[in-house]
Image (cartoon, rainbow, N blue to C red):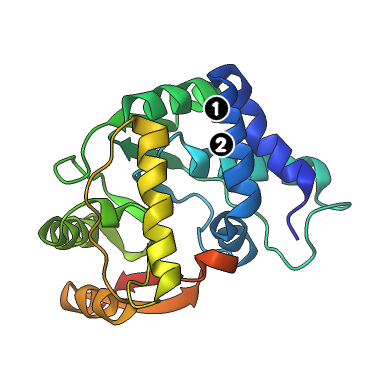
Amino acid sequence: MVPDALIETACRPYRPAGRFAWHFACAKLRNDPFFAHILAHGLIPDDARILDLGSGQGLLAAWLVGAHAWHRQNAESAWPARWPVPPAPRSIHGIELTPRDIDRARIALKAHDARIRFVCDDIRVARFPRVDVVVACDVLHYVDAASQASILRRVRASLAPDGVLLLRVSDAAAGWRARFDRTVDFGMQIARSGRAGRLTCRSESEWLALLDELGFRATIRPMGNGTHDANRLFIATPAV
């Protein structure tokens, strides 16, 4: 169970960015299990250099910053007993195509701009820095199949030898739940950017095959709830 006060701490910086930014942050951080999962299972190491692909309005950065700050104040009384200490990233580099999201991210995280940077660019062509963790949550289905492979190939090249890719996608073979995910993603494109494009989805086995072909060793965890049960989290590391 994620403490409400932790969610409130992570969302608070979005108030100056406008009502949409704040409400979206509250809903996403409260209802999407991805954020709690990365903390509960220690998937991001301390002092990591992080690349956030499709960073949106910077929710991953706000979540990690908020968790670290809230843990300092509440570790003994309210931090979930089985969760490890949250990481303090060395740097976060977010890449996002939608200018409005970049503006919201920069407003919310401006106090941390010495180590958190957001650039408005296309992940198909943007430069990827050398990092320890790459997060690609609900983003690769917005590009075509060839671009998916190209992006993952460049992710592989950008990762440190002991680095990790956290890839959240929807399993295209999951029936009506996968179709529901596509409908939601289509609607979110309209809400966030006023535009929508074609989605390119793969089955769980197809994602595994692609990651293996590109030199990753991957494990899978279910990463949805309710109607979003088609979501999968691939935890992929460079194969030796």
Q: Quadrant of residue 207?
A: bottom left
Q: Position of residue 10 (x, y in %)?
A: 64, 38
Q: Which residue is mark 2?
A: 24
Q: Secondary structure at mark 1?
A: helix
Position of 139 with respect to 59 (left or right) is: left
**Count of labels in the image:** 2
Q: Which residue is mark 1?
A: 20
Q: Are marks 2 and 1 in contact (CB under 8 Å)?
A: yes
Q: What separation in Å lies between label 2 and label 1 (alpha carbons)?
A: 6 Å
- Residue 134 shows up from this direction: no
Q: Camera-side residue: 121 or 217?
A: 121
Position of 213 with respect to 231 (left or right) is: left
- Residue 4 shows up from this direction: yes
Q: Which residue does the image show at 13% across and 58% down from the upper left?
A: 150
Q: Quadrant of residue 54?
A: top left
Q: Position of residue 101 (x, y in %)?
A: 40, 29
Callout 1 amino acid: Phe
Callout 2 amino acid: Phe
Q: Quadrant of residue 64?
A: top right
Residue count near mark 1 (Cα–Cα under 10 Å), binned few <14, some 14–19, many ≥20 = some
Q: Position of residue 96 (x, y in %)?
A: 32, 36
Position of 1 with respect to 197 (left or right) is: right
Q: Position of residue 182 (x, y in %)?
A: 36, 58
Q: Quadrant of the C terminus?
A: bottom left
Q: Which residue does the image show at 20% across and 74% down from the upper left?
A: 210
Q: Secondary structure at mark 2?
A: helix
- Indicate whether 131 appears above or below 57: below
- Indicate whether 39 appears above or below 95: below
